[in-house]
Image (cartoon, rainbow, N blue to C red):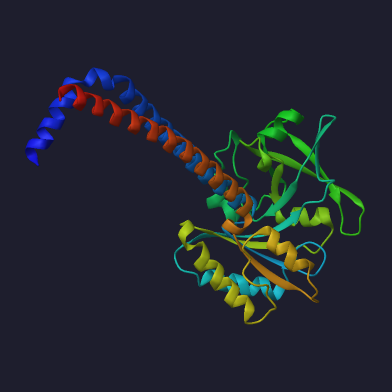
Amino acid sequence: MRVLAYLAWRNFSRNLGRYRVLLLALVLVAAVLVFVLGTVIGMSESLRAKASRYFAGNVAVQGFESEGHSLIEPQAVVLLQDAIADLPQEAAAFSKRSLYYDDDASLFFGGYYVRQRRLIGVEWSLERPVLEGFDLVAGEIPANDDGTGILISTAAARQLGVSVGDSLLVSGSTESGQSNTLSLIVRGIFPENSFFGYTAYLDRQALNRLKNVAPDTVNEMGVYVRSAASEGQVARLLHQALAREFDVLPMIQSRQQREELRASDWKGRRYAVLTLDAQLAEITDLLTALAMIAVGIVVMFLAVVVIGVANTYSMIVYERS
């Protein structure tokens, strides 16, 4: 075996010139494969980080009636806070939010305005460890007791021409349908121009004033986990805790399933627990499909290179014979 290996290596090295183009192609294919996989993995991780901030954590809890937006009852808020406090060390932080995502959410400054997909009312003290990962291009996260601060994206700041320290108007509607505004100060600008860029973060009680609801109103709660592998475990624990005292929907696998369950015939309020994988199911499937297509193309080129090497080696054996 050692002799055969030696002879094969000697023939390969002596005919290296014939392999030069094939070896170059092989290196190119390997480089493309690494680049494609690295890009897809990087996009996936970046997407998960942004989505966890947007969706209130890696695991989110929502409370629905058959129609209307999410609302978590005060008793459920207390139960969830206790359940989150008992979670294992995987929990890095948790969120308690008010949400506004009607079509008229807008920011006004200097005669210009920009629509927002969602206004998110947060408690700065609870989510500070995560929000500091925004890597702001200007400003800083508002202080824990700052009820007048707002974080906006570079997309909104560019369209409005606004800078840190400027005062802008946040416009929306109350629960009864009346127009309302808040005057807030831009404390920070985070770098985002995509889907997640049309979102603003402000104090939860300030957003409740805009909606003209009780100051302690909570629409959504969530948990940020240290490892994606623990998302399922945390979701099951919260689901079990809620199920002991409230009506809950089955574990949700996708946003589409959530909407189908909400459309079914039932009464009262039920709670849903969604992991980040469930929130991003459709997008994750798309990224996976793109990765598989890219890998398939690379494997095809790799097969061509292997066949070329085999044919070349066969010609060398034939010539020596």
Seen as rendered, the residue at the extreme left is 3
Q: Point out residue 81 in the picture as x, y percentages from the top left corner.
A: 60, 70
> Is residue 40 shown left or right of residue 260?
left
> Is residue 11 shown left or right of residue 142?
left
Q: Quadrant of the N terminus?
A: top left
Quadrant of the image occupied by residue 77: bottom right
Seen as rendered, the residue at the extreme bottom is 244
| Residue 91, placed above or below residue 243 | above
> Is residue 266 shown left or right of residue 273?
right
- The residue shown at (78%, 57%) is 208
**Residue 216 can be seen, yes or no:** no
| Residue 55, placed above or below residue 265 | above
> Is residue 179 shown left or right of residue 261?
right
| Residue 76, placed above or below residue 127 | below
Number of marks in the image?
Answer: 0
Q: Point out residue 24 in the picture as x, y percentages from the top left corner.
A: 34, 23
- The residue shown at (54%, 50%) is 130
Q: Point out residue 49 in the picture as x, y percentages from the top left corner.
A: 55, 47
In this view, the residue in front, 204 or 61, is 61
Q: Quadrant of the C terminus?
A: top left
**Residue 241 can be seen, yes or no:** yes
In this view, the residue in front, 256 or 166, is 256
Q: Point out residue 147 in the picture as x, y percentages from the top left corner.
A: 71, 51
Seen as rendered, the residue at the extreme top is 17
In this view, the residue in front, 305 or 164, is 305
